[in-house]
Image: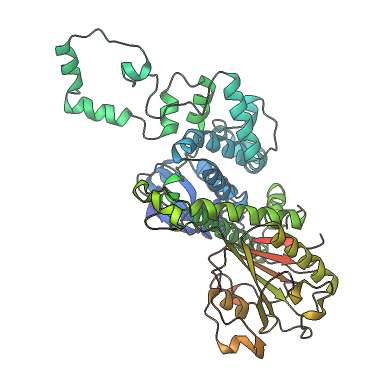
């Protein structure tokens, strides 16, 4: 109980000079807290479903000086604000295999720490030098390698890789499990024959006494970071940075083990939604408590909650292409050589799966009068261009307001693609709600979700690979306010296409400002 209180005290009070206005603690309290004995650190992590966890070893945490405990809370909260974990998940999708990712994970960890310590801890420490001075000195800072300040995690990653290459270290060629150091074998170290007799080799092969075996096991590296710390082939400055990391990192690779690319993408989307919700809630609580958000953190929070500035049509096309590629890779399986002769007879030589070369979009359009004709034409014109350019892409058009008004499978002559929106029926202003249309996407709609006599599709429609909602956003979004998110979140990626004067919400993870 005493150790648990130590963590609670830091989360609730110690990060605020005056006490009680702790934004950092509120951010971590927004995560699910999971005591993890033996972890030897504290860390923010994700579940496979994209939910945030705050993992901590209470015995380790309690043993640290109070000043360092405070820095741990600030450090981990800043990782969440900067969305570092979802961004690392992006790298997992990028690499062909997990072993390749493992080689780079120590670099990612140092790069994340440089970014967090620079933009979040530096101002905090400089304002309280007398309190934090000694415990902050060992932390990883960009100036240790003469890197510029105020860079992103990805930029520091690139700088570290370039730095290692200039020192003759090839990350891609690094061999996991084989290293040159005090714990390495002669073969692993490349030193050739040891010169021992067969009897001596046999004796050494037995591993010695039980105590010696236990000591060797304790010293053996448990992960790639520990291996690199002991490996003399790794540049010494990089080994020093690995030793300086505080708090220590966990590997996020186990979380995605067995997940497909699409499942990882969905976890990333959920994590972004969850992160915005946690930070927004912490900010609101801080304001209600008359607390002050640190100025150096305010711009990070603003960046987290603001909308993307990339042209919306570029983002939309990029999202579509990425989703299509992920689906095609996921549906490709190794052929069965014994069935290869069947392919000539139009039977796929795959024992359990068919290759799926199609991609389906559910396009949901808010028909309220607050969405102007000009905005509608611009948006639908872009959708029409995408459908014409991408082979195998189909789309279902669902018009809605307070209920579903119209549904059709889109084709080149669909009324939804006419030069004016006259073909689409309009049903006045206000009354919009997203629950009915998302129930239709999920296939759980009822007659109450439909306007009487509305046109609807009677044949089976493919499950959506991507959902797009075009709206001004003036309707409840979160479930606790009567909206659909997260209870009615589709399993496919969801894009909210918002009109120029529209309203966004933290639970809208991917938003595109149409015309912006």
Position of the N terminus, as image quadrant, is bottom left
**Residue at x 27%, y 10% (from the top left corner):** 194
Q: Nearer the viewer, residue 96 or 301?
A: 96
On screen, 139 above or below 329?
above
Position of the C terminus, as image quadrant, is bottom right
Q: Quadrant of residue 281?
A: bottom right
On screen, 348 above or below 447?
above
Residue 101 location in percent, x, y? 49, 38
Residue 413 location in percent, x, y? 74, 73
**Residue at x 57%, y 61% (from the top left corner):** 358
Furthest toward the top, the residue is 195
Q: Is residue 324 visible?
A: yes
Left or right: 427 with respect to 92? right
Q: Nearer the viewer, residue 78 or 410?
A: 410
Left or right: 384 with respect to 284? right
Q: Quadrant of residue 350?
A: bottom left
On screen, 295 above or below 395?
above
């Amino acid at each position: 109980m005493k150790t648990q209180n130590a963590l609670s005290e830091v989360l609730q009070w110690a990060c605020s000079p005056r006490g009680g206005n702790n934004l950092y603690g509120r951010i971590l309290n927004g995560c699910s807290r999971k005591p993890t004995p033996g972890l030897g650190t504290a860390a923010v992590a994700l579940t496979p479903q994209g939910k945030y966890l705050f993992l901590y070893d209470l015995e380790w945490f309690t043993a640290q000086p109070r000043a360092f405990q405070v820095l741990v809370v600030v450090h981990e909260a800043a990782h969440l604000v900067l969305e570092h974990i979802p961004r690392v998940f992006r790298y997992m999708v990028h690499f062909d295999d997990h072993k390749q990712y493992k080689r780079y994970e120590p670099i990612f960890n140092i790069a994340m720490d440089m970014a967090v310590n620079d933009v979040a801890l530096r101002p905090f420490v400089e304002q309280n030098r007398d309190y934090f001075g000694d415990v902050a000195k060992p932390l990883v800072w960009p100036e240790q390698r003469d890197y510029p300040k105020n860079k992103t995690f990805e930029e520091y990653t690139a700088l570290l890789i370039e730095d290692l290459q200039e020192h003759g270290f090839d990350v891609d060629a690094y061999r996991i499990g084989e290293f040159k150091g005090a714990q390495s074998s002669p073969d692993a170290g490349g030193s050739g024959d040891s010169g021992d007799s067969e009897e001596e080799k046999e004796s050494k092969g037995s591993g010695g006494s039980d105590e010696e075996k236990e000591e060797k096991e304790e010293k053996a590296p448990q992960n790639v970071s520990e291996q690199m710390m002991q490996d003399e082939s790794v540049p010494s400055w990089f080994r020093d940075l690995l030793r300086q990391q505080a708090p220590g990192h966990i590997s996020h690779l186990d979380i995605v083990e067995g997940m497909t690319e699409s499942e990882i993408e969905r976890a990333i989307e959920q994590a972004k939604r969850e992160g915005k919700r946690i930070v927004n809630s912490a900010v609101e609580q801080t304001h209600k408590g008359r607390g002050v958000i640190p100025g150096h953190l305010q711009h990070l929070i603003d960046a987290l909650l603001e909308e993307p500035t990339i042209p919306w049509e570029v983002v939309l096309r990029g999202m579509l292409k990425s989703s299509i590629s992920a689906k095609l890779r996921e549906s490709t399986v190794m052929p069965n050589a014994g069935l290869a002769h069947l392919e000539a007879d139009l039977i796929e030589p795959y024992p359990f799966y068919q290759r799926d070369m199609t991609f389906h979009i559910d396009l949901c359009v808010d028909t309220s009068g607050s969405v102007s004709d000009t905005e509608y034409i611009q948006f639908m014109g872009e959708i029409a261009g995408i459908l014409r350019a991408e082979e195998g892409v189909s789309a279902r058009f669902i018009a809605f307001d307070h209920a579903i008004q119209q549904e059709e499978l889109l084709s080149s002559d669909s009324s939804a693609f006419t030069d004016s929106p006259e073909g689409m029926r309009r049903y006045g202003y206000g009354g919009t709600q997203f629950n009915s249309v998302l129930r239709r996407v999920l296939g759980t709609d009822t007659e109450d979700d439909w306007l009487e006599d509305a046109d609807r599709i009677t044949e089976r429609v493919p499950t959506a690979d991507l959902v797009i909602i075009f709206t001004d956003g003036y309707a409840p979004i979160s479930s606790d306010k009567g909206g659909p998110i997260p209870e009615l979140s589709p399993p496919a990626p969801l894009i909210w296409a918002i009109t120029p004067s529209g309203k966004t919400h933290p639970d809208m993870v991917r938003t595109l400002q149409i015309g912006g």
